[in-house]
Each structure stands twice: as C-alpha cells, then as structure tokens.
Amino acid sequence: MFYYLLKYLLIGPSLRLVGRPKIEGLENLPKDGPALLASNHLAFVDSLYLPLMAPRRIFFLAKSEYFTEPGIKGRLKKMFFSGSGQIPIDRSGADAAAGALSAGKRVLGGGGLLCLYPEGTRSPDGRLYKGKTGLARMALETGVPVLPVAMIGTDRINPPGTILPRPTRITVKIGTPLDFSRYEGMAGNRFIERAVTDEIMYELMRMSGQQYVDVYAATLKNPKPAPPETAADGTAA
C-alpha cells in the first residue's frame, strides 16, 4: 500500500515534474511472472524512476545500513526504503553474496520483478563499469528472463554528492529479454557466469551509449580490495 502511495501521491508527482521521464520498450516488460532487470547505475534516483515508470512493482536489494539507523530519522528512512521496494541485505562478512542470492530468489519465486545493478555501485563518472557475476548466477539458477535496462539522465538530476534535484529529462529504456538457455545447468561455472555478465554489460553499453571501462567501479571509489564478485545490490552507495 505504502509503495503505491509513494508512487502516485507522495513522491511520484514531484519526480515527474523534475525529471520529465519517458519510457521506451515498455512492451518488453512481462505483464506477470518473474523477471530479472539488469540496470546501469548512475544515481540514487535510478531506484525511484524505474519503478515510477513501470506498471508493475519492482523490488531492489539494498544495503542493510539504510534500515538500521537509530532514532526517528532512522525509522522514517526504514519506512521509505521498505515502501519503495527495497529489501535489506547485509553486505558484510563471507555470507553476503549468499544472502543476496537467497533474497533475490524469494522475490523471483513469488513471481516478482527484481532489479539488480551488476556494477555493484553507482558509476563515479558516468561511464559503465565491469559487471559482477551475482546477477548471472541468479539468472542461471532460476531460469527467469533477464531484461537489460538503461537509465539515461539520472546522473544529471542527482549527481553523486548532491542533495537538491536539478531539472532535466530522464529516459528509461527496457530492452528485449536476453536468452541464456544455452547455459542451462551451468550455474556455478565462473567462466560461464562471466560470459553471461559480459553479454549483459555489452547490451547495457549499447542501449545507454555509455563508455565501457573494464574495471570494477568500486576500485575507483575505494582502493581496498573489491567485495566478492557475486555481490549485487540495489541501491549501493
């Protein structure tokens, strides 16, 4: 209920006013049944504009810190993120990837739409970065359709480090489903999962027009070793 209140009354009208969004390829989104959406990630508002423009509810995997802040502010943030379709994932520890995989499977098993950002974090400079293989593993283990999604213009409305929105024009592109049936039964093979991931990233590059960089975005944000390749979340920092 709160999801639709946010979408149609509390936040949606303001998002439409500021971003003047349009959607292309809506016919590719299944009217029912599970599907994985693989999206590029330019800004926090990616996770707002995609569900705003889609007729079906879309779920995301989000870092658990969004849900655990104490006090009134923390409770309001938890209400907002829960209401906007975010599912908390603990990204610390050795079981982080397994937890994300399990949570994603629950959404898909219930016939839902799950969006993942294979880059694992927002692009620091507007380019498209190397994808992590968690989405590929989930796709191979569940056999659900994978739809590439290109978010265009969200980096202009909400660049990293900014708070107030900047009026612009946002486009959401939903591509045709990618067919990975030729890899049936090969989940867990890291070479196959890398091939699937690279195919997804190539399609995102083609749809978005972004320059591709064959390194993980996290390595530019943090010089420490990147998290496990199978990690994939919804609204990473």
Image (spheres, helix red, strand yellow):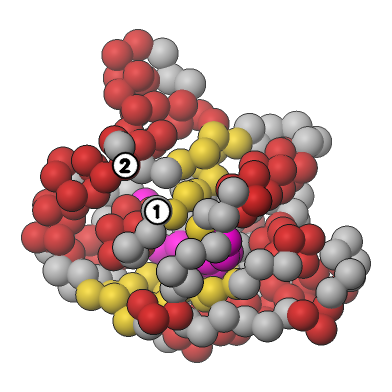
Q: Specify the farthest residue to the left.
A: 17
Q: Which residue is mark 2?
A: 3
The label shown at residue 57 is 1
Provide the residue span drawn in magenta: 34-44
Q: Which residue type does callout 2 highlight?
A: Tyr
Verify CB contact (< 8 Å) between mark 2 and mark 1.
Answer: yes
Where residue 50 sits in the image (x, y, percent)?
A: 35, 62
Which is nearer the eye, 158 or 114?
A: 114
Where residue 216 sits in the image (x, y, percent)?
A: 64, 63
Give the residue displayed 40% in from the left and 63% down from the top. Answer: 42
Give the residue displayed 22% in from the left and 41% down from the top. Answer: 5
Where residue 144 sits in the image (x, y, percent)?
A: 66, 67
Where residue 181 sits in the image (x, y, percent)?
A: 77, 80
Answer with left or right where residue 14 lies relative to residue 82.
Answer: left
Answer with left or right where residue 40 lies relative to residue 79.
Answer: right
Compared to 163, does 209 lie above or below? below
* Disc with the residue nearer the chain's start (2 vs 1): 2
Q: Is residue 40 magenta?
A: yes
Q: Which residue type does callout 1 highlight?
A: Arg
Image quarter (top left, top right, bottom left or bottom right) of the N terminus: top left
* Res 94 visible: yes
Element at badge 1?
loop
